[in-house]
Amino acid sequence: MSLENKLRARLEKNKILLMTHIVLGYPSMAVNRQVVAQMVAGGVDCIEMQIPFSEPMADGPVILKANQDSLAAGTKVADCLAFGAEMTAQHDIPFLFMTYYNIVFKYGEEKFFKDCRSAGIEGLIIPDLPPEMGGNFFKLASEYQVAPVLIFAPTSTDARMAELHKSAAGFIYCVARRGVTGKQSEFGEDFNAYLERCRAATTLPLAVGFGIRNHDDVAAITGKADMAVIGSETIRLVDAQGPEAVGPFIAGLR
Amino acid sequence: MKHTGFFGQWGGAFIPEILHQTFAELTIALRQAQDDPKFWQEYLELMSSYSCRPTPLTFAENLTKHFGGAKIYIKREDLNHTGAHKANNVMGQGLLVKRMGKKRVIAETGAGQHGMATATMAAKFGLECTIYMGEVVVLRQRPNVFWMEKMGATVIPVQDGSKTLKDAINEAFRDWVTNVDSTHYVLGTACGPAPFPEMVSWFQSIIGTEAREQILARHGKLPARVYACVGGGSNAMGIFQGFLDNDEVQLVGVEAGGKGLSTGMHASRLCGQDASPGVAQGYKTMFLQNSDGQMLETHSVAAGLDYVGVSPILSDLAEKGRVRFESATDDEVMTALDLTMRMEGIIPALESTHGFVQAFKEAPELSPDEAIIINQSGRGDKDIFTIAHAFNDPSWKQFIIARAREYSK
C-alpha cells in the first residue's frame, strides 16, 4: 500500500494524524531506539528520521545543535540507513527520512533510493531540493516507490503549489509560517486562509509542521489539516526529561 | 552575462520552498536592471562619487626590476571606499534593494570587508542592517566589528558549526526565511543559489572592464597573465571577465594553501585533491567535504579565503580549463606581503597577497615585453591586528600589553 493510502486508512480512525521527528544519532542511536518505541506506544502515525548534515540551512537552533552533536559523535549515513531498516522491521507504522540533498547526492541518488527501498523507508523529505533541481531524483522516487514529500510555504503562490503538487507523493508538508524549525506559530485567520489554498492545490493529505508543541496546537489544526508534525519539541523533552517522557507526551497530544 | 542558473553542471538554486517566491522576484528585478542602461549608468556614477572608481592600475616598478621578468601591474581595488572590492557588489545590490522597495538588509561576512561594505551601504541608503559573522572571525577582525556597529549595524557572532564564513551564511539564510518579506540578503560573493553568482559577478565585472582599458592604454596590448586570490571567487570573477574572451590571456586563481595542501589544513577546492562535487548553501560546486557529504574544517591565515565552497562559475571555468588554479601557503603569503610593503609601499590584504605569491613565482619566467596584472582585492592596513599577529611583531605586542594594562585600571 502506498504511503498516501496508509495515511488515509489511518485517517479513518483519527481526525488528525501525528508525525514525529528524531535526529538520528542524537543523543545516540540507543536513545533514538527508546524514543521511537515510546512514540509508537504513544500512538504516532508516522515518524521522520533526520539524517544529520553539517549545514542544516532550514533548521532552527534545537535541531541544528542535534545535527552537530550527532555528527561530532561520529554518526555515518550508512548507520542511519541500517537504523531505518531496523525500525521498519520492528514497528508497523510508516517511516520517512528527512535530510538535505547533499547527503543523497554524495551517497549516489540511485543507490540511496535502492537502499531506502530495501530498508522499508516509505518517503523522503529534502527541504533544499525543489522539483526543478531534482529531475533524476523525482524519476527515481517514482521508480523505487519512495514518496517524495514536498513542502508548501505561506509564500508559495497558488500556481507554485499546483506545480509542486505534480511532483509530490505521500502527503504535502505545509510549513505553518516563515522561518526555521522550533519556534512558536500562530494558527489564526491568515493560517486558515493559507491552509485553504493548500487544500485547493492538491489532492494529497496535508501535514502541518513548524511550531506545534502541545495539545492546544494540535487541536487548533484538527479539522483543517490531516496530520500534525511535532519536531523540535520532542528533542527538547528528551533533553530535559529523558526518553520515557515521550510516550505520555505523545498520548496526550490528541 | 545572462543565465538559467547553471554554469555547465555547476550552480543552480537548491533553496527551501519558503524562498522560492523571493528568488523569483529577485531574478525579475535583476533582469530589469540588466535590460535598463540607466541602471548601469546610475551604478557607475555612484561608484565614481561614493567609492573611488575607476581604481588605478599601478605599475610596480621595483617589484618588476626585482624579479627581472614581466612588467607587474597591480589593480588597486584596495582604494575602494571601505578598502576592498566588496563595495562594488554591495552598492550594486543596494541599488537593486531600492528598486525592490525592501527596508532591511542582512549579510554574512568572512574577513569583515563585506560586512563593512554592507553596513556602509545600509547607512547611506537608510536601511536597517544585520551582519552575521562567525565567532572565530569576530575575534580575528575586531576593528571591523567596531566600525560596523558605529555605522548602525547589528553584528551577530555565529557560534554554530566551525564558527566561520559558511556558518555565517547558514545563519543569514535562517534570518532570511524568517524575514523574507522585508529583507534582502546581500550575499557577498559569487556563490550561493542563482541568481547570486551571476549577479555578484555582474557588479564585479567593473574591475575587469577598467583593467582591460587601463592595461591597453599603458602597455599597448593585453597582459600575458592575470592573477587573483579565490575565496568565494568574486574579485577573481570581477577581473577575469575583462579577459575571458581572449584565450591568449592566462587567468590564474590562487586559493588558500594554509599550512600546505598535504596537511588538510587549507581551503583549496579547485587545486589539490581534497574537494569533490556537492550541493550545499543553495548551490552545486566543488566542496571540501568527507565521503558522507559533511563539510570539512578549512584553514587559512586569511579569513576571507577560509570557505568550503567556491563560485560555481569558477568550477565551470576550471573544468573547461579556462582558469588555472594554484595555491599559496600562509608562510608564502607573509613573505610576499613583507616584500610588497618594502619594495612598493603598498599593503595588500592577506587575502589579496595570495595572488601576489603566485605572480612572484611566475614573473621571472616571462619576458620583459609581457605584462601581468595582480588584482589587489583589498587593503591590509586595517587588518593590523591580524597582520601584526601573523608577523609576531614584538613592538606591537608591547603596545597591546601596555594598552590593555591602561584599560584594566
Image: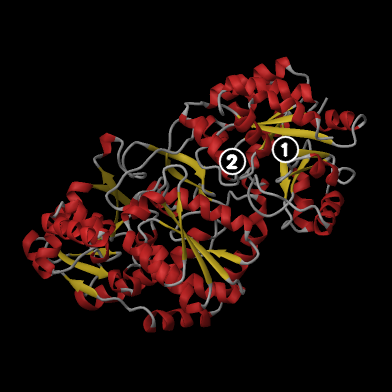
Find the distance from the CA under tag 1 to the CA under tag 2.
13 Å
Q: Residue at x 59, y 72 (%)?
A: B103
Q: Residues within 10 Å of mark 1 (few under 14, many from 20)?
A: many
Dot 1 or dot 2, earlier in sequence: 2
Q: Is residue B107 above or below residue A51?
A: below
For label 2, the SS is helix
Residue A126, x across and y down, in percent: 64, 40
What colouring method underlies this structural image?
secondary structure
Q: Closer to the camera, B272 or A102?
A: A102
Q: Check residue A230 in the rendering and tell me which mark sits there, or answer none.
A: 1
Determine which quarter of the picture holds residue A142. Answer: top right
Residue B209, x across and y down, in percent: 36, 72
Is A173 positioned to the left or the right of A134 in the image?
right
Q: Closer to the camera, A161 or B19?
A: B19
Determine which quarter of the picture holds residue B401. Answer: bottom left
Q: Residue at x 63, y 38 (%)?
A: A136
Is B139 positioned to the left or the right of A203 in the image?
left
Q: Closer to the camera, B115 or A89?
A: B115
